[in-house]
Amino acid sequence: MPPLFPLLRLSLSQLAYYKSRYLIMGLLLVSGSLILFLSLSYLVSVQASIREGLVSRLTGHLQLYNPAVKEVSFYQDPTGQIPWIQDPEALERILTGMPGLAGFTKRILVGGLLQKGDRSMGALLAGMEMNKEIALRGKISPLSLSGMIPIREGEVLLGKGVAKVLRVAPGEKIPLLVPNESGFISGRRFLVRGLFSTPGLDPVAELFVYLNLSDLQHLLGLEKEVGHFVLFAEKETRINSLTASLTHRFKALHLPVSLFTWDEIGKPFLGILSLSQIFFGLTNLLILIIIALTVVNSTLMNLFERMPELGTLLTLGTKRTQLFIFLGGEIILFGSAAAVAGLFLGWMLSTLLGQWGLPALNPAMAMAFGQERLYFKTNGWVWLLSFGVSFLFLVLSVGIPISRACRLNPAEVLKER
């Protein structure tokens, strides 16, 4: 086994001597690892932003449906295709005081029709316990709906998109029509109490109309039935543990329900995240391949210029394994230092973006961010993966040229020179 540390010390001294030859390679490695760190930090931040935004605004952490419901839908069919929870009071008794649960609310989501003069628009009607919703969202996260205020019986809150299409302003009355449980159309005029927006989620939220749960139950011809329960977990609670506890309790009490996690509820938004991961994954791979080819080319040029030196070392009895460690250590030490420098710069830039935020330039970006600005976040996984990928590509890039140099015939090299 060749002495490792003396060879690495020799590599370090050679690195200081040939530092100008590694300048371009170093700049590429710094920029590549910086871009890789920012890209991974971006994906982590988008994932966290979507989860935090939707949890505090639309979906909650968990949702409970009638046991016949096998898949979450954006709205409930009043004709019975997606059945109601018939006895919500039994579920309320179980959920009240549940450890790890910050609170819960009851909701009904159905499709409806709004009219004003000759204009009409289909919308999603959300019957909610408004005071409870506002209190819970304020407790869970400050990212609550802009303009969400308590409303009385006979009042509604319109999404700004709905108000824009129908040209409705607060203080006006607007007819609202829904198919009831009997299959007939029922309607009522509601006072528009105010307008709300959902920063970053307007393409979805602009279709919503919020009203009190009791008002929507009356329109649908329901007495106490509800569409589903929305559960909000405490910040320190692990969702998997809470899900397991709830499932065990429901089974023990022989009370069947369909329990959906955030990942199941937020499939359309996770699809956005998946597209971002694929796009940035392919971009990072392309950047890394370009950098790897450049490193290979720079290494080959460097080794070609040093052929007399390498031939002399082999002639003096240097073993090929020792030469491999000597050359590999020289480049890998330099490359690792350059990669760490790039990661540090990427971390600094991510930290600044965590304070300032990256503005969404269009509605699609706002939808992906879950809000109007994306505040970058980093963690140990970003550091580990960024350095690991950078180091792996560096080793693969320099391995082939160095192996080729170590197989040279020293006599032929010296003869040519």
Image (spheres, grey):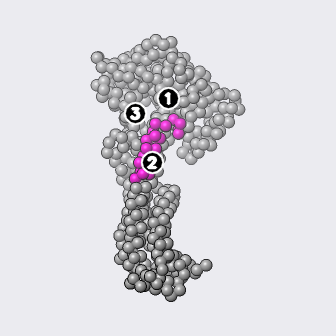
- Please give the label number shown on residue 277: 2
Q: Position of residue 298 (x, y in %)?
A: 38, 70
Q: Which residue is mark 1?
A: 73
Q: Position of residue 153 (x, y in %)?
A: 44, 21
Q: Which residue is mark 3?
A: 204
Q: Earlier in the sequence, mark 2 or mark 3?
A: 3
Q: Is residue 356 above or below residue 233?
A: below
Find the magenta span and give its range.
262-283
Q: Position of residue 207 (x, y in %)?
A: 38, 29
Q: Earlier in the sequence, mark 3 or mark 1?
A: 1
Q: Nearer the viewer, residue 153 or 60?
A: 60
Q: Is residue 387 above or below residue 412?
A: above
What secondary structure predominates along the stretch shown in magenta?
A: helix
Visible residue check, residue 138: no
Which secondary structure, mark 3?
A: helix
Q: Residue at x 30, y 26 (%)?
A: 165
Visible residue check, residue 3: yes
Disc 1 residue type? Ser
- Label 3 crowding class (10 Å Cα cut-off): few <14, some 14-19, many 20+? some
Q: Residue at x 42, y 80 (%)?
A: 307
Q: Residue at x 36, y 75 (%)?
A: 21
Q: Nearer the viewer, residue 238 or 36?
A: 36
Q: Residue at x 50, y 58 (%)?
A: 385
Q: Are marks 2 and 1 in contact (CB under 8 Å)?
A: no
